Amino acid sequence: MTDSRQPTSLDNPQEEILLRCNRCNKPITPETAVLTPTGYRCKECVRAQQKVFDTTKGLDVPLAFIISAAIAFAGSWLAGRIGFLVLFVAPGVGTLTANVVRWVVRRRRSKALNKAVLWGSILGSLPLIVMRLLPFLNLNSGLTAVGGLLPLVWQGIFALLLISSAYYQTTGIKLS
Ligand SMILES: [Zn+2]
């Protein structure tokens, strides 16, 4: 044994490469490595993978927005009339939104689609709430507006239940 010294990383540049992308086998540094559920990957491979999950095309996203807004608006109108029943109806309306959107976009999916459902549900639930709030801004009609207070409360509860239900069930598609 003539050479007994321990090799160091300075002697051997190969040792600098601690990680390899488990998809393309390219050497990656700890700074550029991305930890995925299947191991470390380079940024290029992660980006390519994300595109696979983004399958929406054409009018999918605007359609999802319009459908969500239309269902939310109709539901909000109904919520002002059925009172406490919104507690049972609203989650169902969320399921309806998710199912109709899923059917229309033929089960294609993307993050933009989830956002379209979220914002469609929010904006569709708002007009009637804003309309009922407007009389409260006018002092003269403030007293008569109290009659609209209860429907307003139910429409508010409906909006919250619908938005969370529709969004949860749309994003939940990823898990199944
Ligand atoms: Zn890679």
Image (cartoon, rainbow, N blue to C red):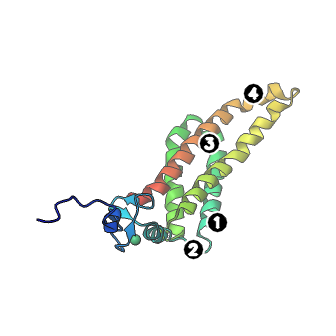
In the structure shown, which secondary structural element does the residue marked by tag 2 occupy?
A: loop
Q: Residue at point 35% right, 62% down?
A: 40
Q: Position of residue 147 (x, y in %)?
A: 74, 29
Residue beneath disc 1: 62
Upstream in sequence: badge 4 or badge 3: 3
Query: Do residues under tags 3 and 2 come within 8 Å of each other at their CB atoms?
Result: no
Residue beneath disc 2: 57
User: Which label belongs to residue 157?
Assistant: none
Which quarter shows the N terminus?
Answer: bottom left
Query: Taking 143 as reference, is 54 above or below it?
Result: below
Between the residue at mark 4 and the residue at mark 3, the CA separation in whole angstroms equals 17 Å
Q: Nearer the viewer, residue 114 or 64?
A: 114
Please, what is the three-letter code of the amino acid marked with disc 2? Lys
Please, what is the three-letter code of the amino acid marked with disc 1? Pro
Q: Position of residue 166 (x, y in %)?
A: 52, 51
Indicate yes or no: mark 3 CB to ligand 1 under 8 Å.
no
Query: Taking 26 as reference, is 122 above or below it?
Result: above
Q: Which residue is situated farthest in the left direction here?
A: 1
Upstream in sequence: badge 1 or badge 2: 2
Residue beneath disc 3: 79
